[in-house]
Image: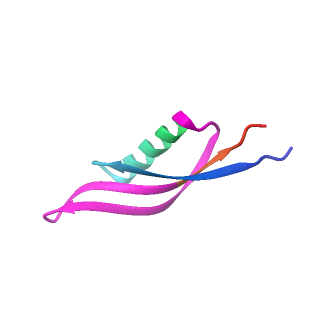
Amino acid sequence: MASVARVTTITARSEQSFDDAISAGIARASETLRNVSGAWVKEQKIQASDGVITGWSVTLEVTFVLDD
């Protein structure tokens, strides 16, 4: 049996780390999308103020398998 997947782009931000931003993004995507099967971290960025990192953000390409 063949399956078909779709990819959607999301951005997530955290005030703790890149890992936390990724986890938050996948958790939120899973609330809306069924059958999330993986993600590709397309981009990572930090926000800084006065030389101190204040936020971490990621752009994710989230893959989910379409229902039959």
Instruction: Return the x and y of residue 63 as percentages of the image width and height.
Output: 62, 50
Q: In this view, does 31 lie above or below 25?
A: above
Horizontal side, residue 47 vs residue 35: left or right: left
Q: Does the magenta stretch include residue 55?
A: yes
**The one of 7 and 51 positioned closer to us in this rendering:** 7
Q: Is residue 34 magenta?
A: yes
Instruction: Please tell me which residue is depicted at 67% across the width and 50% down the height of the picture.
Output: 6
Residue that lies at the very extreme toward the right in this rendered image: 1
Residue that lies at the very extreme toward the left in this rendered image: 50
Horizontal side, residue 43 vs residue 45: left or right: right
Image label count = 0
Instruction: Please tell me which residue is depicted at 55% across the width and 36% down the height of the picture.
Output: 32
Quarter of the picture holding the N terminus: top right
**The one of 32 and 58 positioned closer to us in this rendering:** 32
Q: What residue range appears in magenta?
A: 31-60
**The one of 15 and 7 positioned closer to us in this rendering:** 7
Instruction: Return the x and y of residue 21 as percentages of the image width and height.
Output: 39, 49
Q: Is residue 51 above or below residue 12?
A: below
Chosen colour scheme: rainbow
Quadrant assignment, res 37: top right
Instruction: Please tell me which residue is depicted at 78% across the width and 46% down the height of the picture.
Output: 3
Quarter of the picture holding the C terminus: top right
Horizontal side, residue 63 vs residue 13: left or right: right
Quadrant assignment, res 40: bottom right
Name the main secondary structure of what is drawn in magenta: strand
Instruction: Return the x and y of residue 42 as percentages of the image width and height.
Output: 50, 62
Instruction: Return the x and y of residue 13 as percentages of the image width and height.
Output: 35, 50
Q: In this view, does 25 lie above or below 68?
A: below
Residue that lies at the very extreme toward the top in this rendered image: 31
Horizontal side, residue 5 vs residue 46: left or right: right
